[in-house]
Each structure stands twice: as structure tokens, then as C-alpha cells.
Amino acid sequence: MPDMDTITPLRPATGAQLLAGLRGLLMPHRLIMLALALTGLAAMVTQMDWSWLPAYLPRLWGGLLTTLWMLAGSVILGFALALPLGVVQVIGPRPLRWLASGFCTVVRGTPLLLQLWLLYYGLGSLFAAYPVIRETWAWPYLREAWPYGLLALTISFAAYEGEVMRGAFAGVPNGELEAARAFGMSPRKVFFRVWLPRAVHRALPVLTGEIILQLKSTPLIATIAVADLYAIVTRVRQATLLTYEPLLLLAGIYLCLSAILTIALRWLEGRMPSGG
Amino acid sequence: MQDDPAIQIIDLHKSFGDAHVLRGVTLTARPGDVVAVIGGSGSGKSTMLRCINLLEQPSSGSIAIRGEEYRMRPGDGGLVPADPRQVQRIRAQLGMVFQNFNLWQHRTVLGNVTEVPVHVLGLPRAQAEARARAALERVGMADKADAWPAHLSGGQQQRAAIARVLAVDPLAMLLDEPTSALDPELVGEVLAVIRDLAAERRTMILVTHEMRFARDVASHVVYLRDGRIEEQGPPEQIFGDPRSPHLRQFLGNAA
Ligand SMILES: Nc1ncnc2c1ncn2[C@@H]1O[C@H](COP(=O)(O)OP(=O)(O)O)[C@@H](O)[C@H]1O
Ligand SMILES: [Mg+2]
């Protein structure tokens, strides 16, 4: 074990970190990138046709909200599913272990687009065929497209993160679990107080990357007519006969979202040093 | 109750498969005793210590903490706890210090030290925190309460781990080679803390390779060899006038 007596404490470092960050921005390659970006932006503003933008702003806003809802919903639900998927693969009885690992393998091994269509056209039309279902409270929802989009995104996120959580659970040092037991924690407490939070803590750096990937998967739901950001932009393109402007706007928005997510999640990670 | 031994082990056997690791260990620690356990590597010191809080399940024999014997039933090729609740209750009164510290890395130092008082003993948070801060003060870690374990040196981590034990105010402490994983220059700070606790007459069973330290702080020394107690007695006798040739050789090599 290296002697880390001298490591700077977290809090007083923020000022110095800010400076270091600024200095980081002034590296030559960063400066060139910045110049290119500014030139590009100037060209976009002066050379291109943005006259349609004000009229479509409300709809774009709606699309953005849909995208964010789908992302948040599928990440939260998917992660909630990933926890049992991960645990079961580490300590579950064999049949459950196989079931969970089979689920993860199949979902990760097939295109999300295919899953989405199977759910929407397959399950959707199956539901419609049964009058019993058409009379339940759920029918008004099941007639819509977004529940199938949310379901497909959730399943996909659950499968990928189930795999991540399997590794995270398995990698929690046994000594820490043993310490919890030695202090008289019940198996339940050992799980909820140490094993689970410790595994999530381990998985956090991977999860942040996966959330960005998930954001970039959301446009697929436009193919089943969910009015997310991508779907709205497609409609703009059809209505205005413009190609590049709406797509550039779309790219810009996704880039901003990714950046915001990255910064927020980094901040969260920074509050907990990874203990390996 | 008050006169009961803090820890009493009677004819403890433990096998891992074919390996008969503990071969009838009988040992008593009275309140205030500091029992140092010495012996070569693989002699069964850790296994014995881990049987006391049932991290290992004995193959046969009995263990009682302050007069309360673990209720065990046959099973799994040895003995298994008949009443997991009893085991948890007794464990909460035994603080264990591990060779590798085993601090919970997702909690700050203070979080580690308040964890057991709050979530096992059920103390109100304010009271638990007061206890935790007092314990950190004792081991000289008050200024590191908000630090993450990963940012501490080995010596600091081990002192935090000792504070984690002190915060539960245990009936007895079990220490398994608390300085063996430390860089030489960090051993002293941890030994100093343990020395203080021993001087306070806190009951402890201390597995150690630090012979001079054992001689200084122990009230009783146990020499374990091949799963048996080959010799035991007050430190002056064990270190000054060892009878067993093996012990003599062991001490000769260790010095
Ligand atoms: N979980 C285990 N499974 C199998 N053998 C073990 C296990 N734990 C310890 N042993 C064996 O028991 C013997 C005693 O180990 P231990 O109590 O750790 O010795 P010490 O702490 O005195 O060095 C060793 O030979 C070791 O290999
Ligand atoms: Mg050992």
C-alpha cells in the first residue's frame, strides 16, 4: 500500500482545480478545435436558413421533453431491473442465474430496433386482438406507442446494466462484507448497507457512460411514431424541405445534452472516490 | 454474569475438508485480559480468532461469550448456528480488527464509524455520531472524519478501523495481525493506539508477529502450533523461559 498521507483533501482543492481546468482548455489542440467550432457556428448562422426555427420551437421543446422522459424513465426502471439481474447472476440458484444471464445475452445480442418493433408490432397487435385487454384501464395506454418505446429502452438498459452490476457485485471485496457480518449485521443489512451501495459505487463510472449511450439510443423510438426530438426534427425536414439545418440543430441538442449529463454525473462521481 | 470469562473456548476443532486446522484449543480470556496469540504462519491463529465470532464455523467444541454459549447444531460436516439472531447479537459485542482493515470504501471515515452504532445497535444518529467522534479522537483521527478510506494511509485506515470497533464499545476486541499489512514506518502509530487500549484493560485477543510488543502489552501469551496450544503463560515466562523447543526455535527465528 503506497503512503498516501499527503494526498490533498477534496474540498480546499476546488480553486486550484478550476485553474488547472482552465489551463487544460488552453492546450494548442483545444484552441484549434475551439476556433474551428466558432468558425463553423458563424458559417451556420450567416450562410444557412433558420427562418423556420421560431415556428417550430414549441414542438421541438415538446420533443425534447419526450426524449428526456424516455431517457429518465428507461434509466430508472432499467437500473431497478438491473440490480436483481446482477445479484442473481452472482448468488442466485442455478436456474435463476441461467435465466438472468440468458436474458442479458439475448437482449445484448440483438438490435434494439428489432426488439422495439417486436414489442410494438408483435405485443401491440396481440393486445389489440383481446377484447378483455381492451376493456381494462390499461388500454388507453397500450394503444399509444410510447409505452412500447419505454419498455424496449428499459429492457435494453436493464440487460446492459445487469451485466455491469454482475461484475460490480462480484467485485466488492469479500473483506468488506465479512466486516459487516463480523459487526453483527443480518444478511439483509449486509446486502442493503454494504454490498448493494458498494456495488453501485463501483459501477458508477461505467454507468455514466452507459447513460450517454442510452440517450443516443432514444431516437429509435421515432420509428414507432413516438414524437421524440428526432421525430419532430424529421417532421421539420419534411415540411421545410431543408436537410442540413434541422439535422445540425439536432446534433447540437444531443451534444449539449451529453455534455450536461457528463458534467452532472462527473460531479456525482467526484463526491465519492472510487475505492476499487 | 460479571465473573464469567469474557471469552471461553473449550476443545475447539476446525477442519477445512481434510485439513485438521484446529485440534482441540481451550482458552479463556477474563475481562481485562490482553491475550496475545503467537505462532508460525498456518498454525491456525486466524482460524481460531474467526471462530470466536463465528466467521468460521467450528467442527466441534464450544465457545461462550460472557457466559453465553453459541447455540449450534450439527450440519454441513460440522456445526452450524442454531439461532442466527443470537450470533448477530453476540457479534455486535465483539469488535474485530482485520489485517487488511476492511473499511467500507463507499463511506467516509465517520460513516464507517457510525454505521454499526446506528444500523446494528440502533442508537440515535446524534448519539452515534458523538460516540464516533470520541472514538476517532482516541485514535488520533478526529481531523480525518470526512475523509474517504481510499485517501488514507494504511496506518490511518487501521486506526479508523480501530475507531469503528471502539464506537460499539465491545465486550472484547479481536485483532488479527493488525500491523502486518502496514509499511514498517506506519506500524508504530497503530501499535501505540493498541498499547493505550491494552493499558485501559480492554479485553482483547491479539494475534501478532510483533514479539516485543506482545511481551509489553499482553497479560497472557498463547503459542499456537499445528492447531494446538503448545505453551501458554504470562509474557515473562513465554518470552523469558520458554519450555517447548518449538517455541524456543520460533522465538529465536522471530527475534
Ligand atoms: N477457508 C479455508 N479453506 C481451506 N483452508 C483454510 C481456510 N482458511 C485457512 N485454511 C488453512 O488453515 C490453516 C491455518 O490457517 P490460518 O488460521 O489462517 O493460519 P495463521 O493465521 O496462523 O497463519 C492453513 O493451512 C490454511 O491454509
Ligand atoms: Mg493469519
Image: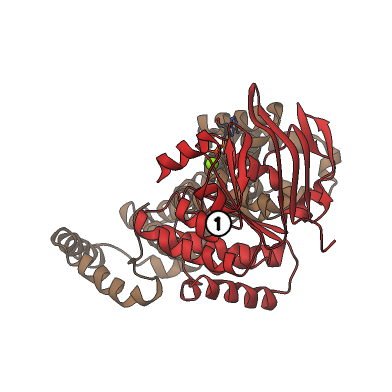
Residue A110 in sight here:
no
Task: Please tell me which residue is depicted at 40% across the width and 64% down the height of the picture.
Answer: A263
Provide residue B181's location: percent of width, then percent of height.
44, 49
Task: Please tell me which residue is depicted at 52% across the width and 42% down the height of the picture.
Answer: A171
The residue closer to the viewer here, A7 or B72, is B72
Q: Which chain is red?
A: B
Task: Please tell me which residue is depicted at 25% across the width and 67% down the height of the picture.
Answer: A45
Q: The residue marked by circle 1 belongs to what chain?
A: B
Secondary structure state at the residue bearing disc 1: loop
* Number of numbered markers: 1
B62 vs B151: above or below? above
Provide residue A110's location: percent of width, then percent of height.
52, 30
Provide residue A3's location: percent of width, then percent of height.
34, 58
The residue closer to the viewer here, B163 or A105, is B163
Q: Which chain is brown?
A: A
Residue A259 in sight here:
yes
Task: Please tell me which residue is depicted at 45% across the width and 36% down the height of the picture.
Answer: B249
Viewed as shown, does residue B93 lie left or right of B218? right
Provide residue B75's location: percent of width, then percent of height.
80, 29
The residue closer to the viewer here, B5 or A75, is B5
In the rendered structure, which amino acid carries the disc numbered 1? Trp
B184 vs A31: above or below? above
Residue at mark 1: B104
